[in-house]
Image: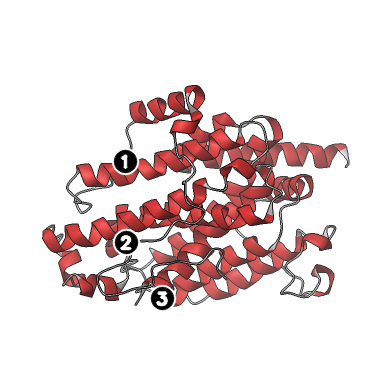
Amino acid sequence: MKAQDNTLVARGYEMAERVTRHHAKSFFFASFMLFGMRRKAAFALYAYCRRLDDMVDVADGADQGAVPEDLAERLVRARRAVGELFLETPELADPRMPPPATRASGGEGPWAPAELAALVDCIRRFRVPEQPMQDLISGMEMDLTKRRYASWAELDLYCYRVAGVVGLMMAPMLGCSEEWALGPAADLGRAMQLTNILRDVKEDLDRGRVYLPLDELAAFGLTVDDLRAGVVDDRWRGFMRCQIARARAYYARAAAGIPALEGFGCQRMVKLMGSIYGDILRVIEQNDYDVFQGRLSVPGTRKLALATAILVRPASVLPAPPAPEVTVPLLPTGFPSRVGGVGS
């Protein structure tokens, strides 16, 4: 690599670190468990995801949730740009798509050239596959057409595409070489996304979106109008208890894959990230399930306590479940009791 390329890559990693520090305080805090290039790569992968998310969110908020007509085309160009990242590593390309060299050119995305240079370095260094990066764009495309989710099966696919795939992107960087551990990696993303959804009900409503399964709301006698009114009663508490139990089952399933992470500090980093996000569920419970008055968060002192516990007694935080497979709780109306591993 030429000296000027090295400079561009270094600048890209610096930009990615700034993006992470600004937008993802919990992730940035947990990243202190990583060292050297693994930490830089974590920032590069986060910046990749964040720029896409911002592109959709800014467009989504342009007119009370109205999505601009050109956003679909911008995501198509972003897909092309991602494919171009794998021109020199076609063995990592998405097997569902033609080889990168034969695809349409003209890729363009929300990333700065330096950020892309750092991302290519990360891909080559840690062998990050293209497929989850493309699946993330598929998740962004779902936001173009869906503002409601009829069932958990629909929402689960969305959670996989916008967050489960992040676990799959991060897994090689974290030293995961075991294929069986990819399911737990995706499950951690699902758990964190569902946690975000439960925390951000009001924010999503303000954007004209409901990321809660409508049939499960109905099973508890709730409507979207109840959400708009900020109703917190026994129906809502019962619904939230079931959703929190589901999220915790995913955290437990994710914990089963942590021993497969062989990079120095990586197990601690994932434990810290999972425990901080998982603690949001405790805060929601502590607040009597009222998520309508403002965004709930984990205090800094609690994050420090979790980090200390992980350093001193790592086995006590986000422990692996005793059973080989964790069963997702069954809802009263008879929804499936098991949720699959990696989705599509």
**SS type, badge 2:** helix
Count how many numbered circles sit on residues in the image: 3
| Location of residue 273 with respect to 153 vertically, above or below | above
- Disc 2 versus disc 1: distance between alpha carbons? 17 Å
In x, y percent, where is residue 149?
36, 74
**SS type, badge 1:** loop
User: Badge 3, how many Cα within 10 Å: few under 14, some, many 20+?
Assistant: few
Evaluate whether residue 111 shows in this view.
no
Specify which label sits upstream in the sequence, 1 or 3: 3
Residue at 82% x, 62% y is: 91
Which numbered disc covers residue 297?
1
Q: Which residue lies furthest to the left in this view?
A: 233
Residue hosting label 2: 204
**SS type, badge 3:** loop
Q: In which quarter of the image is residue 72?
A: bottom right
- Disc 2 versus disc 3: distance between alpha carbons? 13 Å
In x, y percent, where is residue 11?
69, 38
Amino acid type shown at disc 1:
Ser
Amino acid type shown at disc 2:
Asp
Residue hosting label 3: 146
Which residue is at the front of the view, 339 or 158?
339
In x, y percent, where is residue 294?
23, 48
Q: Quadrant of the N terminus?
A: top right
